[in-house]
Amino acid sequence: MEKTRQERYNLIYGNTARKMEAAPAYKPKRKKRPAPRRTRPETTPRTRENQKRALEFDFAFIRVLTAALAVVVLVSFFYLSERAEFLNQQTVLAQKKSELNTLQVENEDLNLEIEQSINLNDIQAAAKKYGMKKPSANQVIHYDSKEVEYVRQYGKIPKAD
């Protein structure tokens, strides 16, 4: 196959043409010198004594460490027990709220059913059956209540003359 013009003349197009570099000359490898040994300074008997003491167990430290560990375990236990009780109370509260909502919905449904079951024509027919009739205008007594919610009757209603 014939080479393309770019391959024949080793051309590089664009504004980022690179310079051709020759291969670097052979450099002999240097032998690494061994690192000089560092000698430790002579340890004094006092230093050796301190090192021995540092490696020994100090029972006072172990007692303090054990006491601290016991305190951490107790605090963790009490925290976890309180947390568990709190979560139980939250679940009970959620259940009670759900129960309250269910009862409120049932109550609203029953009130609506009662309101829909009242038929004024049936009541009027039953009243006529028992000899009742509508009161005249002078028999009606109007009562103005300051409390809007309900009226309690503590005695008989007086007759209007």
Image: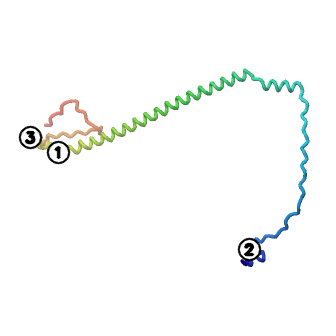
Q: To which quarter of the image does residue 28 belong?
A: bottom right
Residue at 89 percent across and 29 percent down: it is 43
Q: To which quarter of the image does residue 139 belong?
A: top left
Task: State the separation of the CA atoms marked 2 and 1.
Answer: 99 Å
* Color encoding of the figure: rainbow
What is the crowding at mark 1: few (fewer than 14 residues within 10 Å), some, or many (at least 20)? few
Residue at 85 percent across and 65 percent down: it is 23
Q: Earlier in the sequence, mark 2 or mark 3?
A: 2
Instruction: Please state if 40 lies on the left or on the right of 137 as rendered.
Output: right
For label 2, the residue is: 14
Say which quadrant the N terminus sits in: bottom right
Q: Position of residue 75 (x, y in %)?
A: 59, 27
Amino acid carrying mark 2 in the image: Gly
Contact (Cβ within 8 Å) of mark 2 with mark 1: no
Q: Earlier in the sequence, mark 1 or mark 3?
A: 1
For label 3, the residue is: 129
Number of the front mark, 2 or 1:
2
Number of the front mark, 2 or 3:
2
For label 1, the residue is: 120
Task: State the separation of the CA atoms marked 1 and 3.
Answer: 14 Å
Amino acid carrying mark 3 in the image: Lys
What is the crowding at mark 3: few (fewer than 14 residues within 10 Å), some, or many (at least 20)? few
Instruction: Please state if 128 lies on the left or on the right of 47 as rendered.
Output: left
Residue in front for this viewpoint, 90 or 153: 90
Element type where label 3 sits in the image: helix
Q: Position of residue 104 (x, y in %)?
A: 33, 39
Element type where label 2 sits in the image: loop
